[in-house]
Every structure is written in structure tokens, then in C-alpha cells.
Image (spheres, helix red, strand yellow):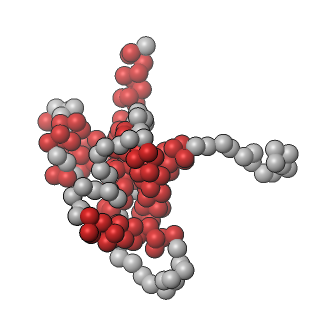
Amino acid sequence: MTDLPPIWPQPITITKLEAARRQLNTALELWFDDGDPVAIHTLAYAAYEIIHVLSKKNGRLRALVFDSDIIKDEFRSEWNVLVKKEDNFFKHANNDSIRMLKFNPSLSELFLTFAARGLYYCGEDPTDTERAFLVRLAYERPRFFTDEGRKLYLDRFPVDEIENIRNTPRNAFLIGWRLGMEQLRRQKT
């Protein structure tokens, strides 16, 4: 198998966690670039699904989306059908090849957020892109976050900077975030 003709790329070896992280970070790059919402959702969901299982096997104690502790057990199956509806529509055509779907792209942010949290429960440090997403989302949708979440993501910056951050295009925010993180790393060495 390693003697493929030069036109074929050589196979890569990858773990499930690495695959999920690549899917997540690609989805985040698209999100920051206002990319295609269907591609963002499909990648975010795929990453979340893997991370959900791996974090549970890693001993995760806190609930994520599929096993949310705010959903009654008797409705869990219905809940999971509901949250998986878009992903199934985007990936499969066996039973509904003609059907149409009204899709709210904000749902992808749920899977992006909980995929990032699930990585934390796997003992993984966030990438700059993952951290930038959580901070940016907290600025865009502060009412979604608990007091603990707001302290974690919003209290990092002076109040007068919040409006500047909100008004900065997402892709410019990510570039600035990465430059700032690189400067911090250089200062530590």
C-alpha cells in the first residue's frame, strides 16, 4: 500500500480525536470566514459526535448535548432525533431524497461550543482557534452564557473594548487573536 504511484498521496495515520479536532478547527475556520453554513454544520456535528463519545469514555462527568441533564429521560430519544435532524438531512438521502429543510445555522454554534467543551473534558488544551471561537461567541451572544461562562470569556477585556470586539469582523478578530496569542507565547520564552 505504500508503493502507490506518485499521483496518489501517501496514507496518513490519524486517531479519532485528531480527526475530530481537524473537523472542528476546519468548521471554526469556515465560521470565522462566514463560510458555507451547511459545511460548517456537517463538520461541527461530525466533530461533536466523536468528541461526545471519547469524552464520555474518558470519564466526563458533565453532560453535553446528547446526554444533557436538562432533558427528561423519557424524552431523550425524541431530543436526540431533534438535534440530529439537520445532520441526517445533510448526509443521507435514503428515505427523504426530495424533502426540503429549514435550517437555522445558529444550531451549528451549539455543536461547535460543545465540541470544544468536550475536548476540555478529554484533557485537551484548546487551540488558538477554539479559544478564539468561545471568546468571540461570548461577545456575540453573551446572554447564552452563565455567570461562570461570562467570567471565563468576557471578563478578560476592559468594558470599553467589548464594543470594538463586537464590531470587528470575525475573520479580522481571529487574525488579531492569533497575533496576540503568538506575542504572549514569545514573551513567556
The picture places residue 171, in percent across and down from the top left corner, at 39, 46
Name above or below for residue 15 compared with residue 36: above
The picture places residue 155, in percent across and down from the top left corner, at 18, 34
The picture places residue 132, in percent across and down from the top left corner, at 35, 40
> Is any part of residue 53 visible from this angle?
yes
> Can you name the residue that lies furthest to the top here?
189
Question: What residue appears at the point 38 percent right and 28 percent down from the top-left corner?
Answer: 181
How many dots with numbers? 0
Question: What residue appears at the point 42 percent right and 41 percent down from the top-left corner?
Answer: 58
The image quadrant of residue 173 is: top left
> Is any part of residue 47 visible from this angle?
no
Q: Nearer the viewer, residue 129 or 14?
A: 14
> Can you name the residue that lies furthest to the front here?
74
Question: What residue appears at the point 37 percent right and 38 percent down from the top-left corner?
Answer: 120
Q: Give the quarter of the figure containing the C terminus.
A: top left
- Horizontal side, residue 163 vs residue 1: left or right: left
The picture places residue 66, in percent across and down from the top left corner, at 35, 59
The image quadrant of residue 107 is: bottom left
